[in-house]
Amino acid sequence: MNILSSIWKAVSRGFHRLGSPREFYTISNYLTPVFGALFLVLSLIGSYYALFVAPADYQQGDSYRILFVHVPSAWLSLFIYVVMASAAAIGLVWRMKMAFVVAICSAPIGAAFTSLALATGSLWGAPIWGTWWEWDARLTSELILLFLYFGVMALYYAFEERRTAERAMAVLAVVGVVIVPIIHFSVEWWSSLHQGATVFREGGPAMPPSMLTPLIYMALGFTFFYGYILFLRARNMVLSNERKSKWVRALLQPQTLQPQGLPSKILQAESGKEGTQ
Amino acid sequence: MNNTFILFCQREWQLLFRNTSNLVQPLCFFVIIALLFPFSLPLENELLQRIGGGIIWVSAVLAILMSLESMFRADFNDGALEQWLIHPRSLPLAMLAKVFAHWCATGLILALFSPILCLAFRIPAEQIWVLFLGLIIGTPSLSLIGAIGAALTVTLHRGGVLLAIIILPLYIPILIFGAGMITQSYSGAAIYSQLYALLAILALAITLAPFAIAGALRTTIE
């Protein structure tokens, strides 16, 4: 029990620390390059295996290799939506500034990955299915997901006041996540031309390890790429949102500008204010 | 509890029925949109008969969408909305009543009028009943989900296009099941699965949407 409660305390302390923009900015100083490096390494390894090691498909030849971009983008399009909606819910419930920032910064990235999944799917479909577009369940759901992203972004940018904008956007994101499964279920009505689940299914993946390994590398690499871009965007947004606060002003003054972290003096001066975040 | 619901229904009905244009405008819009389709299609009776149900559903969705924009507008402008927000009465229940009254003025009237449109599209009597049933069950969900969007955009001056962008994707399941019911019935199959799906969506919308509407109003009006 003691161990559990101390773990819980550590987790919640970390959570609360991330909730403060200033703490987030400091921590992200170290995390951003880590995510970037992980993305680079994983996707390079993945690309090497995908392009040179994995064998050609006996039916589709080399054209199937677009899968190593298509599947990770499709996975991220859903993953980012869940992250966005969870962050939005956290922001609404605990009024956490950083949660809104994460939700808002995720939306354009999610929309980009959804477009990428649609575009690569279309390019793949043209030679293999003989059609650029098919009114199939997964394709259509993905397209609707893209419009949900657009809706969330449009709502956010329609408001002039930031606080209202981020909360309105959060409500829509949460409503969307309730309706997304219903949309998917309803859209599955049409007979599906798209192949069924291949990776996560009963009895293990229906894919040889030589193809599955690069796919996993690529999926992980893409996920870290999302984290990397998210951090970059969130750091920008934090600076712009908090531009009137003391620590950002101090940070942006030329003499205190340092490549890593905040100067320790500012951290000490601001440490008395943590409760107000 | 019931008191709030009845009071709000009475208030909304009075407001709606004192100004007849509230009732006539969505209906006119509905009919005109539906009649635009035959002009843009080859004039074949069989084709119109086959796609008529879908056209009527799309027209109903658009008519309800148009009426949603003004749903909270007057109450927001005269300050009534802010009074509801600070009143101890249950806001979700009040919003449920408001949406119910709104549905009576739009969805219900559209559904009641749809058989006449069906005649224009030469839809057989059996499918007219199916369409009517689908509209009666489906349009309340449209109003409930749409009211969330209306609440989110009430403070924006030009919220109309934005409302369409954020709400129309959420309407897709209802459209699929509603229009699917007619297609199914047209090919002679049973319509129960779509009917039950529509009812399930309605049950979900009635229980969850009022809270989302109340939350959205509290978010945008501060």
Image (cartoon, coloured by chain):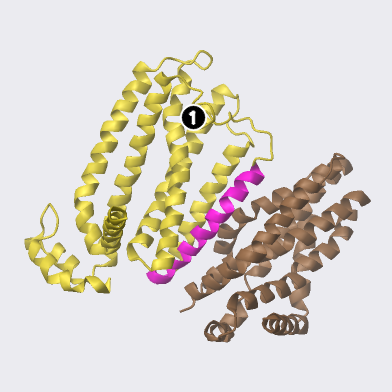
Chain colours: A yellow, B brown
The subunit letter for the residue under badge 1 reads A
Write the residue at 70% across / 64% down: B64
Image location (x, y in percent) of residue B146: 63, 64
Q: Which residues are magenta?
A: A160-187
B89 or B111: which is nearer to us?
B89
Write the residue at 88% across / 53% down: B128
Q: Which residue is mark 1?
A: A199
Image location (x, y in percent) of residue A78: 48, 44
Q: Main secondary structure of the magenta part?
A: helix
Image location (x, y in percent) of residue A165: 43, 67
A127 or A237: which is nearer to us?
A237
Write the residue at 70% across / 52% down: B175
> With respect to residue B222, does A199 lie above or below?
above
Q: In the rendered image, which quarter is residue A157 located in? A: bottom left
Check if residue A168 falls in the magenta segment. Answer: yes
Q: Residues within 10 Å of mark 1 (few under 14, many from 20)?
A: some
Q: In the rendered image, which quarter is residue A116 located in? A: top left
